[in-house]
Image (spheres, grey):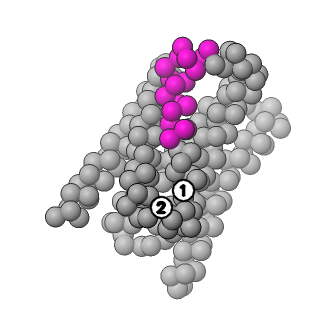
Amino acid sequence: MDQRTAINLFRLLVLVGCSAPALWLGWQWFYGDLVAVPGEAVVHFTGKTGLILLLLTIAFSPAFRFTGWVGFMAARRQIGLWAFFWLVAHMLAWMGLDQYWDWPWIRREMVELPYIRYGVAALLLLVPLAVTSFARVRKAMGWTAWHWLHRLIYVAAALGVTHLWILTRADYLLPMLFAALLAALTLFRLIDAAIHRQ
């Protein structure tokens, strides 16, 4: 198998892996298998899926460094946009299924609840990253500016993990795993940058 075919198959795998949760969620919703409060289950599911994909987006760079396979870099924008999609879906599900589009109440929740503010801040930081993820925009911005802007993904991921941590009431295993993974990825990024500067 040549490299181009392998990359295309990997991009297809990313497409299937990122879209399959939507099919599963639709199936569960249709057959009423989303526990007692379906709306809350959708909010949690979309948020966790988006956060996992966001961390995977960050992990693709170290994967490329370790393996040297360009497929990770070729699919990084794709999985990053899927992460953004799922996190937007998370926000819309919270507004519609949990808050019933009650805008005064939504504004009050955003002001009064720290975990909501962390989540909104994370999503807002991802908006310019999604908008500037295309090759034409990157070329217009210049590599240096684009590169510095896209480092905001680490801040957004940290806010997302904090959002999940505050929401957790009993079993902290998942937020701890996310926090440890993000810390490891950030440390790798700092070490890698220091090595390349030298």
Amino acid type assigned to the residue bearing label 1 in the image: Thr
Label 2 vs label 1: CA separation? 9 Å
Relative height, residue 30 to residue 144 (above, below):
above
Mark linked to residue 154: none
Identify the residue position indicated by label 1 in the image.
132
Q: Quadrant of the C terminus?
A: bottom left
Q: Residue at x 37, y 72 (%)?
A: 68
| Residue bounds of the magenta highlight | 108-125
Task: Tell how many labels.
Answer: 2
Return the x and y of residue 59 as percentages of the image width and height.
42, 55
**Corner quadrant of residue 194:** bottom left
Local crowd size for mark 1, using a 10 Å CA cut-off: few (<14), some (14–19), many (≥20): some
Relative height, residue 3 to residue 63 (above, below):
below
From this viewpoint, is residue 155 visible? yes
Return the x and y of residue 23 as percentages of the image width and height.
74, 48
- Give the structural element (helix, strand or loop) at label 1: loop
**Corner quadrant of residue 9:** bottom right
Amino acid type assigned to the residue bearing label 2 in the image: Met
Q: Residue at x 46, y 66 (%)?
A: 73
Q: Residue at x 59, y 74 (%)?
A: 8
Relative height, residue 49 to residue 17 (above, below):
above
Relative height, residue 162 to residue 4 (above, below):
above
Q: Residue furthest bottom?
A: 2
Identify the residue position indicated by label 2 in the image.
141
